[in-house]
Image: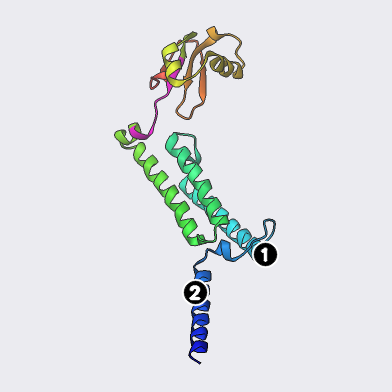
Amino acid sequence: MQTNRSRDRDLKQTKHLALFAAAKRPKSARRDKNMFFDNWFEIIRILTIGVSAYAALIFLLLVSGKRTLSKWNAFDFIVTIALGSTLATVIMSKDVSLVEGVFGLGLLIGLQFIVTWLAVRVKWVKNLIKAEPTMLLSQGQFLPVAMRQQRVSESEIRAAIRGTGSASIEEIEAVVLETDGSMSVIKKSPNNSRSALQDVA
C-alpha cells in the first residue's frame, strides 16, 4: 500500500514538472509553425497593423515637414533607416503593440525635428552634426589633397561633369562634394562670380 502511494506521488510530481517545463518553453518551441503558412489570424493581424502603422508614419512625416526625409547629413540618414526598421518591427513582431510602435516612430521623428530646429539656430549644434561641403575641382584643376581625403577619383568627377552635359573640364568653375554625398557641378559664370562657393571648404 505504501509502495502504491509513493508511486502515485512520484507520478504527480513528474506531471507537475512536465507542465512547468512546457510553460517555460518559448512559444516557438511549443508551437511548430508551418514555414509557408500558419493561420489566417496572423495574416489579418499583419494586414491590420501594417496598414495602421503605415498610415501613422505618413501622418507623422507630413506633420514634421520635408526635412525629415531629406538627404542632409548622416543624422538624417540614420533616422530614415531607423524609421524603416521600426515600421518593419511593428508589422512583423507580435511583441510590439501598435501604440508602442507609433510612439517609437513619433519619438524618432521628434528627435530629428528637435536636432534640425537647433541646427539652424545654434552654431555649435550645426557644426556637430553637419559636414562641410568639399571642393574637388576648382577652375578646371583637380584638387588631389581634397580628393584623397574624400576618397574620390578623377573618373568619378568626370562622370559628374558629363552628367551635366558638359564636354570640357575647362568649362567648369568647380565641382563640390556636398554633405549628402552628391556632387554639384558649377559652370563658369559670365561675370566670374563665386558667391555660391563661399561656404565650401
Residue 128 spot, x, y in % from top left: 34, 34
**Viewport quadrant of the C terminus:** top left
* Tag shown at residue 17: 2
Q: Earlier in the sequence, mark 2 or mark 1?
A: 2
Between the residue at mark 2 and the residue at mark 1, the CA separation in whole angstroms equals: 31 Å
| Kind of residue at disc 1 | Asn
Q: Element under label 1?
A: loop
Q: Residue furthest right?
A: 36
On screen, residue 159 versus residue 6, left or right, reads right
Q: Element under label 2?
A: helix
- Residue, disc 1: 39
| Residue bounds of the magenta highlight | 128-136
Front residue of this view, candidates 23 and 10: 10
Q: Is residue 88 above or below residue 143?
A: below
| Kind of residue at disc 2 | Leu
* Tag shown at residue 104: none
On screen, residue 131 versus residue 156, left or right, reads left
Q: Does the segment drawn in magenta span residue 96? A: no
Residue occupying image coordinates x 39% and y 26%: 132
Disc 1 packing (10 Å; few <14; some 14–19; many ≥20): few
* Nearer mark to the viewer, of 2 and 1: 2
**Mark 2 and mark 1 residues within 8 Å of each other at the beta carbon:** no
Front residue of this view, candidates 133 and 74: 74
